Amino acid sequence: MPKRPAKPEPEPAKTADEAALLREALKGVAPIPDPGKASLRKSPPAPVPVQQMRDNELVLADSLSDNTALEIGRETGEELVFLRNGLPTPILRKLRRGDWVIQDQLDLHGLRSDEARRLLAEFLSQSLKHGYRCVCLIHGKGLRSENREPVLKRKVGNWLAQRDEVLAFIQARPEDGGGGAVVVLLKAKGKNQY
């Protein structure tokens, strides 16, 4: 049979002597004046989603790899040309003519591959948030590289082809960087097609 908790014993009634002693001890004490302010407790700070931030950084870093199974077309020599499957080919002609205004650009030349990949992913994400449709990526011509070949050019092409938001890209016009840059057409904000 379970034991019942013991009932607390009632406190003995204070005697008149105790009350008199208390009044004597508190003689001359005045109550603290009320300042008229409410005492508010500060709410605790919002939790910081540290693990989610780490996961987002890993996804961003892994979102662009150096290898791709996608074929990036070449029209002339080393010119990078890409058009997402199912899109009309006049898009490339419009990109080449400059029908879309370049709204932002990112200069990657001179960076290490891992730095360039991270910056490219961040730049594309920010461009989408801002609603940009056409951006320019400067990868350099490779004039200062070991074999005088553009190191980032092919990698940038592979990275871009892997991104769903990239509809097409083509080598920039001479006034926009020529063989050292690529003009990229991004999906319209909130739409699946161009």
Image (cartoon, rainbow, N blue to C red):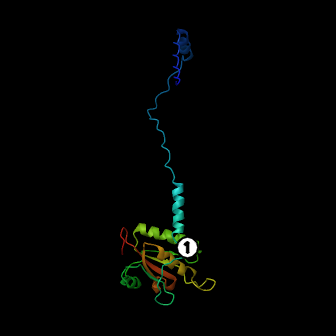
Q: Which x, y percent locates residue 8?
A: 52, 19
Quadrant of the image occupied by residue 54: bottom right
Identity of the residue furthest to the bottom in this view: 76
Q: Pointer 1: what residue?
A: 116
Q: Which x, y percent locates residue 125?
A: 46, 68
Residue occupying the point 50% across, 79% down: 157
Residue occupying the point 41% across, 85% down: 96
Between 92 and 28, the one lying in front of the other is: 92
Residue occupying the point 39% across, 69% down: 131
Q: Is residue 143 above or below residue 12?
A: below
Direction from residue 112 to residue 182 in the image, left or right? left
Between 115 and 24, the one lying in front of the other is: 115
Between 114 and 70, the one lying in front of the other is: 70
Q: Which x, y percent locates residue 28?
A: 54, 18
Q: Amino acid at mark 1?
A: Ala
Quadrant of the image occupied by residue 191: bottom left
Q: Is residue 13 above or below residue 118?
A: above
The C terminus lies in quadrant: bottom left
Q: Is residue 43 above or below residue 12?
A: below
Identity of the residue furthest to the top in this view: 16
Please, what secondary structure does the residue beneath circle 1 have? Answer: helix
Identity of the residue furthest to the right in this view: 146
Circle 1: is it few (<14), some (14-19), or many (20+) Cα within 10 Å?
Answer: many
Q: Which x, y percent locates residue 144?
A: 61, 83
Q: Is residue 38 above or below residue 101?
A: above
